[in-house]
Image (cartoon, helix red, strand yellow):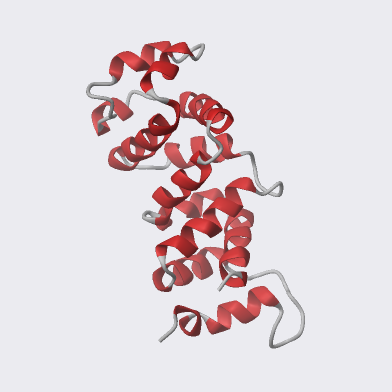
């Protein structure tokens, strides 16, 4: 069965099919959860990427700082390692206010213990520089969150709605 068949009722709500109008969804959190259980990871990642890039949602670095603050230590380390792939430890040392973080790195990757020493505001700074240096970091981070879609609920209803609309439009 095609994953879209599994979420046909949700598709109709977000596309305006059925009743003919595209009313605001009642529960984008539940809808997002249902769709992410059925959709392939690349579709989920593309939807999340659109939410990160949307001018209807907070800026990417701000959203990442919020997601980071609600993540467990393993998820924090995973996110930081995605950012470090884009920025690189050498560049991290050159970012004002973040030079001390480069001393936390051993072997070029961040451990959950090290990640617990990083603040959301430092993540926001890292994300700002990573996005400037390598805009594809948004897709890399989106792929990470496609593996952890339950975290996206803290991004808010609007971000989830943007992600869902994109996921359901691009079948």
In depth, the one of 143 and 11 nearer the eye is 143
Please determine whether, in this image, residue 164 is positioned above or below residue 107: below
- 137 or 114, nearer to the observer: 137
Is residue 95 or residue 31 the one in the foreground?
95
Q: What residue is shown at x 49% (from left), y 85% (from top)?
A: 5
Above or below, 18 against 86 in this view is: below
The number of numbered discs placed on residues in the rendered structure image is 0
Task: Choose top left, top right, bottom left or bottom right for residue 21.
Answer: bottom right
Q: Is residue 121 above or below residue 33?
A: above
Q: Give the percent coordinates (x, y) of residue 66.
A: 51, 39
Left or right: 29, with 76 as reference point: right
Q: Is residue 80 above or below residue 122?
A: below
Q: Is residue 90 left or right of residue 108?
A: right
Q: Is residue 24 left or right of residue 106?
A: right
Q: Quadrant of the C terminus?
A: bottom right
Q: Is residue 66 left or right of residue 1?
A: right
Work out whether residue 20 or residue 45 is closer to the camera in this orientation and state it. Answer: 45
Residue at (41%, 68%) from the top-left corner? 40
Q: Residue at x 40, y 87 (%)?
A: 1
Q: In the rendering, at what x and y percent does residue 28 appear?
A: 57, 65
Q: Position of residue 2 (x, y in %)?
A: 44, 83
Residue at x 63% of width, y 46% of height: 53
Q: Residue 98: image x %, image y %?
A: 45, 15
- Quadrant for residue 162, please give it: bottom right
């Amino acid at each position: 069965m095609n994953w879209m068949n599994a979420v046909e009722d949700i598709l109709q709500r977000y596309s305006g099919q059925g009743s003919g109008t595209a009313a605001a969804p009642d529960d984008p959190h539940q809808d997002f959860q249902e769709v992410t259980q059925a959709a392939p990871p690349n579709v989920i990642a593309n939807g999340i990427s659109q939410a990160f890039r949307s001018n209807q949602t907070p800026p990417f670095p701000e959203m990442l700082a919020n997601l980071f603050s609600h993540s467990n230590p393993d998820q924090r380390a995973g996110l930081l390692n995605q950012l470090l792939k884009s920025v690189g430890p050498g560049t991290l040392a050159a970012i004002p206010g973040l030079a001390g973080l480069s001393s936390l790195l051993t072997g070029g990757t961040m451990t959950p213990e090290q990640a617990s020493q990083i603040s959301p505001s430092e993540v926001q700074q890292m994300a700002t520089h990573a996005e400037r240096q390598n805009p594809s970091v948004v897709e890399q981070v989106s792929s990470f969150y496609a593996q952890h879609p339950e975290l996206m609920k803290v991004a808010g209803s609007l971000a989830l709605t943007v992600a869902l609309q994109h996921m359901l439009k691009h079948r």
